Image: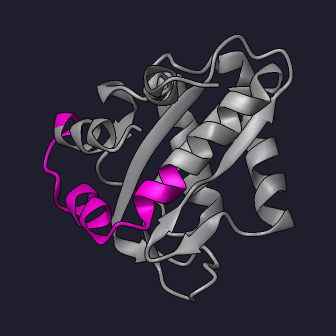
């Protein structure tokens, strides 16, 4: 079973994007993947593959589960290590959430396909934390990447 430290391992201050510029689902995914590449947490050679996998996952059903949160995610063959990006769109973006509300907080998780259990454990952790109104509020109000990461750290089981 995963430990708390391995759950937060894909996230660091370089993986926080406070203000997304994109205004639609495709743009959000592209911007988050580009940020992961720029932060050197995702190899640039994997950019297109990861983006395609995230888009394909969204086509099967939106990863926005309501209350302004979406968790785009993919398990990628032969990826060496996972990466995460926490990003915000303060004005909100239509991500086809189940409650119809615009999404302000995006938590992207890209994991090696060989680490399925850890991938699912991280998704469970984030989705449980996201049900908490304080978690969502603190992420939206944070003014620095460090503050966003601290909100995540406080919720690690």
* Residue 142 seen anywhere in this rendered image of the structure: yes
Residue at image point 74% right, 31% down: 117
Give how far across and how far down residue 86 sits, in percent.
42, 44
- 36 displayed left or right of 142: right
Residue in view at x 58 percent, y 55 percent: 71
Q: Decide which of 157, 134 is in the foreground and name it.
A: 157
Viewer can see residue 48: no
Residue at 82% in and 20% down = 114
The stretch in magenta equals: 126-146
Asked if the stretch drawn in magenta spans residue 133, the answer is yes
Residue 11 place in picture, x, y as percent: 43, 29
Q: Is residue 83 or residue 125 the one in the foreground?
A: 125
Magenta span dominant secondary structure = helix
**At 62% from the left edge and 39% from the top edge, which residue is drawn?**
121
Q: From what the image shows, is residue 143 above or below residue 37?
A: below
Q: Is residue 67 above or below residue 69?
A: below
Residue 111 falls in which quadrant of the image?
Answer: top right
- Does residue 113 show up magenta in the picture? no
Quarter of the image with the C terminus is top left
- Residue 61: percent from the left, percent from the top? 79, 69
Q: How is the image coloured?
A: one colour
Q: Is residue 25 above or below residue 102?
A: above
Quarter of the picture containing the N terminus is top right
Provide residue 88's location: percent of width, then percent of height: 36, 57
Q: How many marks?
A: 0
The residue at the far left in this view is 143
Q: Is residue 49 left or right of residue 44?
A: right
């Amino acid at each position: 079973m995963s430990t708390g430290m391995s759950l937060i391992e894909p996230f660091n201050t370089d993986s926080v994007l406070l203000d997304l510029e994109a205004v639609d689902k495709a743009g959000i995914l592209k911007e988050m993947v580009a940020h992961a590449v720029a932060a050197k947490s995702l190899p640039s050679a994997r950019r297109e593959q990861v983006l395609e996998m995230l888009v394909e996952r969204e086509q099967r059903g939106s990863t926005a589960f309501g209350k302004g949160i979406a968790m785009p995610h993919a398990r990628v063959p032969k990826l060496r290590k996972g990466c995460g990006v926490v990003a915000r769109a303060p004005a909100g973006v239509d991500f086809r959430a189940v409650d119809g509300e615009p999404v302000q907080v995006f938590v992207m998780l890209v994991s090696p396909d060989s680490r399925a259990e850890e991938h699912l454990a991280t998704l469970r952790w984030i989705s449980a934390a996201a049900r908490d109104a304080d978690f969502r509020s603190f992420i939206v109000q944070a003014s620095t990447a460090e503050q966003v990461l601290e909100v995540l750290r406080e919720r690690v089981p």
